[in-house]
Amino acid sequence: GFIGPRLDLDDPGPVTISADATAVTVSGVAEPGAQVSVENQPVELDRKHRFSATATVPADAAEYDILASATDFHGAKTETVVRVIRAH
């Protein structure tokens, strides 16, 4: 099988957010040239191959999974899930 591209998150989770928070930032480093998306929204890489995206967390969700993925030019894909936990 193909080995997917590098996708290293700054905080792989679980991430705790405050009771009234409705968003969380997902950031990290991806393989040069990879197409990165967070919650199926494309994210640009900077010159150091870093990315940062804000993902919406439903206000009524006690726990929520955010999907981040990177796809290289061969079509190989790496997916990782960030678990978000809402503080009470």
Image (tube, grey):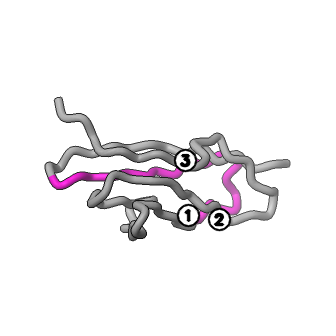
Q: CA distance from mark 3 to mark 2?
A: 12 Å
Q: CA distance from mark 2 to mark 1?
A: 5 Å
Q: Earlier in the sequence, mark 3 or mark 2?
A: 2
Please report the residue visible at 37 percent of the width from the left and 51 percent of the height from the top: 69
Considering only vertical position in the picture, is 3 above or below 19? Answer: above
Residue 24: where, in percent of width, then height? 64, 61
The circle drawn on residue 55 is 1
Please tell me whether residue 60 belongs to the stretch shown in magenta.
Answer: yes
The residues colored magenta run 56-73
Q: Earlier in the sequence, mark 1 or mark 3?
A: 1
Q: Earlier in the sequence, mark 2 or mark 1?
A: 2
Could you tell me the amino acid type at mark 1?
Answer: Ala
- Residue position for label 2: 23
The circle drawn on residue 65 is 3
Could you tell me the amino acid type at mark 2?
Answer: Ala
Please report the residue visible at 39 percent of the width from the left and 53 percent of the height from the top: 30
Position of residue 40 in the picture relative to residue 71 (left or right): right
- The part of the image, by quadrant, that contains residue 32 is bottom left
Could you tell me the amino acid type at mark 3?
Answer: Asp
Q: Name the one closer to the observer, 85 or 70.
A: 70
- Quadrant location of the N terminus in the rendered image: top left
Please report the residue visible at 36 percent of the width from the left and 59 percent of the height from the top: 36
Position of residue 38 in the picture relative to residue 88 (left or right): left
